[in-house]
Protein backbone atom coordinates (compact mmCIF):
# COMPACT_ATOMS: atom_id res chain seq x y z
CA UNK A 1 0.00 0.00 0.00
CA UNK A 2 1.39 3.43 -0.91
CA UNK A 3 1.46 6.11 1.73
CA UNK A 4 -1.65 8.33 1.74
CA UNK A 5 -1.27 12.00 0.99
CA UNK A 6 -1.62 14.12 4.12
CA UNK A 7 -2.56 17.81 4.35
CA UNK A 8 -2.09 19.73 7.57
CA UNK A 9 -4.71 22.44 8.02
CA UNK A 10 -4.10 24.78 10.92
CA UNK A 11 -4.88 28.29 12.14
CA UNK A 12 -2.38 30.10 14.33
CA UNK A 13 -1.83 33.44 15.93
CA UNK A 14 0.93 35.70 14.60
CA UNK A 15 3.10 34.36 17.44
CA UNK A 16 2.64 30.73 16.47
CA UNK A 17 0.01 29.41 18.88
CA UNK A 18 -2.88 27.07 17.98
CA UNK A 19 -4.76 27.48 21.30
CA UNK A 20 -4.51 29.20 24.68
CA UNK A 21 -5.20 25.90 26.50
CA UNK A 22 -6.40 22.41 25.65
CA UNK A 23 -10.14 23.25 25.56
CA UNK A 24 -9.70 26.38 23.44
CA UNK A 25 -11.34 25.54 20.10
CA UNK A 26 -10.31 27.71 17.08
CA UNK A 27 -13.92 28.71 16.38
CA UNK A 28 -13.71 30.85 19.54
CA UNK A 29 -11.09 33.16 17.99
CA UNK A 30 -10.48 32.37 14.30
CA UNK A 31 -12.04 34.43 11.49
CA UNK A 32 -15.16 33.34 9.60
CA UNK A 33 -13.04 33.14 6.43
CA UNK A 34 -10.66 30.67 8.12
CA UNK A 35 -13.56 28.54 9.29
CA UNK A 36 -14.78 28.28 5.68
CA UNK A 37 -11.37 26.97 4.61
CA UNK A 38 -11.33 24.55 7.50
CA UNK A 39 -14.70 23.03 6.58
CA UNK A 40 -13.74 22.90 2.88
CA UNK A 41 -10.67 20.86 3.84
CA UNK A 42 -12.67 18.56 6.14
CA UNK A 43 -15.20 17.88 3.36
CA UNK A 44 -12.42 17.12 0.86
CA UNK A 45 -10.64 14.58 3.08
CA UNK A 46 -11.23 10.84 3.37
CA UNK A 47 -10.29 10.80 7.06
CA UNK A 48 -9.18 13.37 9.64
CA UNK A 49 -6.47 12.54 12.17
CA UNK A 50 -6.34 14.31 15.53
CA UNK A 51 -5.37 14.03 19.17
CA UNK A 52 -7.82 13.24 21.93
CA UNK A 53 -8.15 16.87 23.11
CA UNK A 54 -8.94 18.19 19.63
CA UNK A 55 -11.54 15.46 19.15
CA UNK A 56 -13.13 16.21 22.52
CA UNK A 57 -13.12 19.99 21.91
CA UNK A 58 -15.26 19.49 18.78
CA UNK A 59 -16.95 16.09 18.92
CA UNK A 60 -18.68 15.19 15.62
CA UNK A 61 -20.05 11.65 15.87
CA UNK A 62 -20.78 11.44 12.13
CA UNK A 63 -17.24 12.25 10.87
CA UNK A 64 -14.54 9.80 9.79
CA UNK A 65 -11.84 10.31 12.42
CA UNK A 66 -8.66 8.63 13.62
CA UNK A 67 -8.06 9.81 17.20
CA UNK A 68 -4.61 9.45 18.76
CA UNK A 69 -4.51 8.40 22.43
CA UNK A 70 -1.84 6.56 24.40
CA UNK A 71 -4.76 4.50 25.75
CA UNK A 72 -5.80 3.30 22.29
CA UNK A 73 -9.49 2.40 22.35
CA UNK A 74 -10.35 0.79 19.00
CA UNK A 75 -13.53 1.52 17.09
CA UNK A 76 -15.55 3.67 19.50
CA UNK A 77 -18.04 4.55 16.77
CA UNK A 78 -18.60 3.06 13.29
CA UNK A 79 -16.36 5.72 11.68
CA UNK A 80 -14.08 6.68 14.60
CA UNK A 81 -10.96 4.71 15.41
CA UNK A 82 -8.92 5.51 18.53
CA UNK A 83 -5.36 4.23 18.49
CA UNK A 84 -1.92 4.68 20.00
CA UNK A 85 0.34 5.57 17.05
CA UNK A 86 3.52 4.40 18.79
CA UNK A 87 5.27 1.95 16.49
CA UNK A 88 2.88 2.67 13.59
CA UNK A 89 3.56 4.46 10.32
CA UNK A 90 1.22 6.78 8.39
CA UNK A 91 0.60 3.93 5.92
CA UNK A 92 -0.46 1.68 8.82
CA UNK A 93 -3.23 4.18 9.57
CA UNK A 94 -4.63 3.66 6.07
CA UNK A 95 -4.49 -0.12 6.46
CA UNK A 96 -6.47 0.02 9.70
CA UNK A 97 -9.38 2.02 8.24
CA UNK A 98 -9.48 0.75 4.63
CA UNK A 99 -12.41 -1.62 5.25
CA UNK A 100 -14.62 1.33 6.27
CA UNK A 101 -13.44 3.89 3.69
CA UNK A 102 -10.13 4.16 1.80
CA UNK A 103 -7.66 6.67 3.21
CA UNK A 104 -6.04 8.32 0.19
CA UNK A 105 -6.25 11.96 1.25
CA UNK A 106 -5.87 12.45 4.97
CA UNK A 107 -6.30 15.67 6.93
CA UNK A 108 -4.10 16.38 9.94
CA UNK A 109 -6.11 18.38 12.47
CA UNK A 110 -3.69 18.68 15.40
CA UNK A 111 -2.87 19.40 18.12
CA UNK A 112 0.81 19.95 18.70
CA UNK A 113 1.91 16.32 19.27
CA UNK A 114 -0.04 15.14 16.24
CA UNK A 115 1.70 17.76 14.05
CA UNK A 116 5.01 16.54 15.53
CA UNK A 117 4.18 12.87 14.81
CA UNK A 118 3.48 13.50 11.11
CA UNK A 119 6.54 15.74 10.76
CA UNK A 120 8.72 13.08 12.42
CA UNK A 121 7.40 10.55 9.86
CA UNK A 122 8.07 12.99 7.00
CA UNK A 123 4.40 12.62 6.05
CA UNK A 124 3.14 16.19 5.69
CA UNK A 125 2.70 16.80 1.96
CA UNK A 126 0.95 20.16 2.09
CA UNK A 127 0.14 22.73 4.76
CA UNK A 128 -2.81 25.14 4.76
CA UNK A 129 -1.71 27.66 7.36
CA UNK A 130 -3.99 30.57 8.23
CA UNK A 131 -2.45 33.26 10.41
CA UNK A 132 -4.80 35.47 12.41
CA UNK A 133 -3.68 39.00 13.41
CA UNK A 134 -3.66 38.13 17.11
CA UNK A 135 -1.04 37.25 19.69
CA UNK A 136 -1.60 34.97 22.71
CA UNK A 137 1.85 35.34 24.30
CA UNK A 138 1.61 31.77 25.62
CA UNK A 139 -0.32 28.60 24.91
CA UNK A 140 -0.05 25.50 22.72
CA UNK A 141 2.49 25.95 19.88
CA UNK A 142 2.06 24.78 16.30
CA UNK A 143 5.07 22.45 16.76
CA UNK A 144 6.74 21.56 20.04
CA UNK A 145 9.13 24.30 21.15
CA UNK A 146 7.94 26.76 18.50
CA UNK A 147 5.64 29.06 20.49
CA UNK A 148 6.38 32.78 20.45
CA UNK A 149 7.57 33.00 16.87
CA UNK A 150 6.20 33.59 13.38
CA UNK A 151 4.81 30.23 12.18
CA UNK A 152 6.14 30.98 8.67
CA UNK A 153 9.67 30.79 10.09
CA UNK A 154 8.79 27.53 11.82
CA UNK A 155 7.55 25.79 8.65
CA UNK A 156 10.27 27.26 6.48
CA UNK A 157 12.92 25.89 8.87
CA UNK A 158 11.10 22.54 8.90
CA UNK A 159 11.74 22.23 5.14
CA UNK A 160 8.53 23.49 3.55
CA UNK A 161 8.26 25.92 0.62
CA UNK A 162 5.74 28.76 0.56
CA UNK A 163 3.63 28.50 -2.61
CA UNK A 164 0.73 30.87 -1.82
CA UNK A 165 0.34 33.82 0.54
CA UNK A 166 -2.97 35.67 0.27
CA UNK A 167 -4.99 38.12 2.36
CA UNK A 168 -8.17 36.37 3.50
CA UNK A 169 -10.11 39.45 4.61
CA UNK A 170 -9.61 43.13 5.37
CA UNK A 171 -8.74 42.60 9.03
CA UNK A 172 -5.27 41.15 8.43
CA UNK A 173 -5.83 37.37 8.28
CA UNK A 174 -3.42 35.66 5.85
CA UNK A 175 -3.83 32.29 4.16
CA UNK A 176 -0.63 30.49 3.19
CA UNK A 177 0.04 27.19 1.39
CA UNK A 178 3.26 25.21 1.84
CA UNK A 179 4.48 22.14 0.00
CA UNK A 180 7.23 19.60 0.26
CA UNK A 181 8.37 17.15 -2.42
CA UNK A 182 7.64 13.48 -1.54
N1 LIG B 1 -5.65 26.25 15.84
C1 LIG B 1 -5.76 25.06 15.27
O1 LIG B 1 -5.73 24.92 14.05
C2 LIG B 1 -5.92 23.87 16.15
C3 LIG B 1 -5.65 22.61 15.65
C4 LIG B 1 -5.80 21.53 16.50
C5 LIG B 1 -6.19 21.70 17.80
N2 LIG B 1 -6.45 22.94 18.24
C6 LIG B 1 -6.84 23.13 19.63
O2 LIG B 1 -5.75 22.72 20.43
C7 LIG B 1 -6.24 22.13 21.62
C8 LIG B 1 -5.76 20.70 21.77
O3 LIG B 1 -4.42 20.60 21.41
P1 LIG B 1 -3.40 19.65 22.23
O4 LIG B 1 -2.05 19.87 21.62
O5 LIG B 1 -3.64 19.80 23.69
O6 LIG B 1 -3.93 18.25 22.00
P2 LIG B 1 -4.28 17.04 21.04
O7 LIG B 1 -3.13 16.61 20.21
O8 LIG B 1 -5.58 17.27 20.37
O9 LIG B 1 -4.54 15.98 22.18
C9 LIG B 1 -3.48 15.55 22.98
C10 LIG B 1 -3.76 14.14 23.37
O10 LIG B 1 -3.84 13.36 22.18
C11 LIG B 1 -3.14 12.13 22.37
N3 LIG B 1 -1.96 12.13 21.50
C12 LIG B 1 -1.54 13.13 20.68
N4 LIG B 1 -0.42 12.74 20.03
C13 LIG B 1 -0.15 11.50 20.44
C14 LIG B 1 0.88 10.56 20.14
N5 LIG B 1 1.84 10.84 19.24
N6 LIG B 1 0.85 9.37 20.76
C15 LIG B 1 -0.12 9.07 21.66
N7 LIG B 1 -1.13 9.90 22.00
C16 LIG B 1 -1.13 11.10 21.38
C17 LIG B 1 -2.83 12.07 23.85
O11 LIG B 1 -4.01 11.53 24.44
P3 LIG B 1 -4.01 10.66 25.81
O12 LIG B 1 -3.85 11.68 26.89
O13 LIG B 1 -5.34 9.98 25.79
O14 LIG B 1 -2.84 9.72 25.71
C18 LIG B 1 -2.66 13.52 24.21
O15 LIG B 1 -2.87 13.79 25.59
C19 LIG B 1 -7.75 22.17 21.53
O16 LIG B 1 -8.21 23.34 22.15
C20 LIG B 1 -7.99 22.27 20.04
O17 LIG B 1 -9.23 22.86 19.74
C21 LIG B 1 -6.30 24.03 17.47
Image (tube, rainbow, N blue to C red):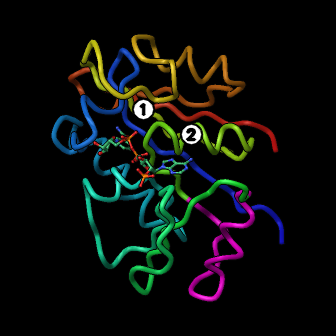
Q: Earlier in the sequence, mark 1 or mark 2?
A: 2
The residue that label 2 is drawn on is 127
Q: Is residue 157 magenta?
A: no
The stretch in magenta equals 89-106
Q: Is residue 104 above or below residue 115?
A: below
- Quarter holding residue 162: top right
Closest to the observer: 92 or 28? 92
- The quarter of the rendered structure image containing the N terminus is bottom right
Residue at 72% in and 25% down: 159
**Label 1, label 2: how far apart the Cα atoms are:** 10 Å
- Quarter holding residue 182: top right
Q: At numbered mark 2, what does the secondary structure look like: helix, strand or loop?
A: strand
Q: Position of residue 151 (x, y in %)?
A: 48, 20
- Quarter holding residue 117: top right
Q: Position of residue 178 (x, y in %)?
A: 61, 33
* Foreground: disc 1 or disc 2: 2
Q: Count how many numbered circles sit on residues in the image.
A: 2
Residue at 66% in and 67% down: 93
Q: Is residue 53 above or below residue 91?
A: above
Mark sitting on residue 97: none
The residue that label 1 is drawn on is 175
Residue at 34% in and 51% down: 54
Amino acid sequence: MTRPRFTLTVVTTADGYIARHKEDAPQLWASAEEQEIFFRDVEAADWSVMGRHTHEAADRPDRRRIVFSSQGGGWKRPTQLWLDPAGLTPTDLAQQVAHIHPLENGLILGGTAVHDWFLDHDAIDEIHLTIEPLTFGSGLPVLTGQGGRDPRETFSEAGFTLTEDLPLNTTGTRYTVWTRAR
